[in-house]
Each structure stands twice: as structure tokens, then as C-alpha cells.
Amino acid sequence: MERHIALELARITEAAALEAACWTGRGDKHSADEAATAAIRRLFHSVDMDGTVVIGEGEMDEAPMLYIGEKVGNRRGPRIDIAVDPLEGTETVANGLNNAISVIAAAPEGNLLHAPDIYMAKLAVGPALAGRLSLNDTIGVTLSKASEILHKPLSDMTVSILDRVRHREMIAALREAGVRIKLLGHGDVMGAIEAAVESEVDMYVGSGGAPEGVLAAAALKCLGGEMQGRLMPDTSEDFDRCRRMGMEDPHKLLNMEDMVGRGNVLFVATGVTSGDLLSGVRYLPNRKAETHSVIMHSSNRTVSYLRTIHHLTGTRDNITEA
Ligand code: VTB
Ligand code: MG
Ligand code: MG
């Protein structure tokens, strides 16, 4: 995939972040989400690609914009799959909390998993643990394997997990094992990524959204890390969703190839509110604003950070980069 597409996509997540950040702390997650989604959809059309949304805002009948199957791009470029979450962390923005991002992953057509919007059990790790652990093991076994491979005692390890009632037992097991725990309010795309960059987090565990799982897997591929997942269909409607997405065995253990294919992947994200890896939008005097984005390519495993000063002219439709 061409490099300029990555920059184009980052320009798009920047615009979405600028739009969404206007809603910080205003208690209105729908408006924040809508603003980000509209910005992405509007700007997608100018990109030289023949893209199809495979992970987006929902199925065609439930999402007016960026629905699964929607064609994006000007069709003058490569055929690619797009996974997008215009605002990962709608509640976070509405409540003025940390760690919301706007995020897009792309891969050659046919490579990204069409994940239904249900929960996925996940295990994300960095290069040192990639290929060495299994989501089939209990959390206790996983921790002791990791401790041995990393040559560090459990008390020196940090595991991150979404702070949810459904994780009560897993959190108890982590506490029992004696690891440090980073409890996430929201945002398990960045949560999983943190396990694979220079940070205190060794591993991300627990369940979160399946679409977010595929997005994180794209980044982990660029970082030399690994994500394993297993969908958690619960209701008959969930099973129907899996079937509609073409899944033969909804309980299959999903590896990197299942989620992001064999080809090159790219991943871009812009901070909306500040997190540990990306700063959020900063509004500056004189109608300027600053955004921070990360751009990753799996082809050469590069990770670039992009800091942009935007000059906000007139309406929000006219964001130009200084
Ligand atoms: C996660 C997290 C998201 O949803 O995927 C989570 O990354 C899973 O759903 O930021 P629950 O909130 O029901 O646990 C979010 O928190 C919101 O999309
Ligand atoms: Mg969304
Ligand atoms: Mg989300």
C-alpha cells in the first residue's frame, strides 16, 4: 500500500479528532461521535483508494454513515479494506476523561476480519511475548509463562484490563498472582497497543469490543506484537451476526492472520483527549489547534509520530494544516 495513503488517513483522523474534541466534557456522546463520523466520511472521498468499510459504525440498516460495506475513497487507487472507529471512547469525550482517539486501519482487500460488534476475549502482548502465549491457557498459566519468558517476577509485571464487572474473576486472579494492574475506564485499542510499545504494560487481557480488537491487531502487527482473540457471542442475535459476517465457527481462536491477514497493514490514530501514548487536541490562541497522531506501517515496522498545528479558518470545513 502506498505511503501517501497513510498520511492522507492521518489527515482524516486529525480532522475527526478536532471535531470530536469540541464536545469534550459536554455530556453528549452522540454529538461527539456524530461529529467525528461526519468528518471522516466527508474527507474519505478525496483519498486515492478504492476502499470498503469492513469495520465501521454498524450494519447498513443501523448506521447511516460508515456502515459495513460502504465504499469509500475516489476509486482511483488500490482496493483496500478499511476498519474505522471515528471516535474510540465516546463516553470518555462526553465525560472529559482521558484516552479517546480517532482511528483507522487499512489493508489490501480481503485481509481484515469482518468482526461483528460483540465482545471479544483478547490477549495482547509485545514482541518479547509474541508467539509464546495462548488465549487457551488460564490467566494463571499465562502469567507464569510470561514471567518466565521475560525473566521477571510477577510482582514486577503490569497487566492492563478494562475495569468491568464481567472481569471480576479475572481481576481477582491477577491480584492473587501479585502483578500490578492498570485498570482502563475505556479505550482498549490503545490499551492493547500499550502492551507492545515501550511502557510499563506487559500484557493486555480481558474482553472488549471485537471491532476494537481488529483495530488493535493491525497496530500490533506493525509493532511486532501479537493479539489473540475469541469472539464471545451470547444471544442468538450475536450468533446471527457472526454468521452474516461469514464466520463458520464463531468460537474459533483468532490469530493475527485471521484478524489482519498476511499483507501489509497500516494504522493511524489521532488523540482526542490525552492518553498515555498520544496527547489529545490542544486548542491554542489565534484559532489554532494542535493534534498528535501516530502512523504505523507493518511493511517496515515503522512508527511515526505526527504533530500538526492546524489553523482553524472560518467553519470547521476549512481546516488547513500550517
Ligand atoms: C471497549 C473499549 C471502548 O467499549 O472495546 C469497550 O475499547 C467494550 O465495551 O472504548 P464495554 O464498555 O461494554 O465493556 C468501549 O469502552 C466503548 O466503545
Ligand atoms: Mg464508533
Ligand atoms: Mg469504539
Image: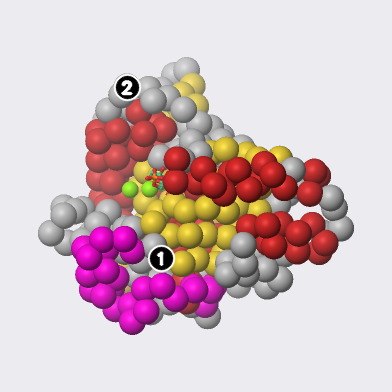
Task: From this view, report whether residue 74 is shown above or below residue 16.
Answer: below
Residue at 50% of width from left, 66% of height from top? 229
**Is residue 208 inside the magenta stretch?**
no
Q: Is residue 103 visible?
A: yes
Q: Would you say the residues marked 2 and 1 are in contact, meaning their CB atoms lie under 8 Å apart?
A: no
Residue located 37% across and 43% down the image: 87
Specify start and end residues of the magenta stretch as a single range.
233-257
Residue 171, quarter of the rendered image: top right
* Residue at x 47%, y 54% (from the top left corner): 207
Residue 163 pos. (x, y %): 50, 39
Q: Secondary structure at mark 2?
A: loop
Give the answer, above or below, for where 278 lies relative to 76: above
Is 60 on the left or on the right of 304, as rendered?
left
Which residue is under mark 1? Answer: 231
**Three-letter code, disc 1:** Leu
- Residue 308 to residue 294: above or below: above
Q: Position of residue 133 (x, y in %)?
A: 67, 68
Q: Measure how far apart labels 2 and 1 are at the Cα level.
A: 33 Å
Q: Give the left or right position of residue 153, taking residue 10 as reference.
A: right
Residue denoted by label 2: 26
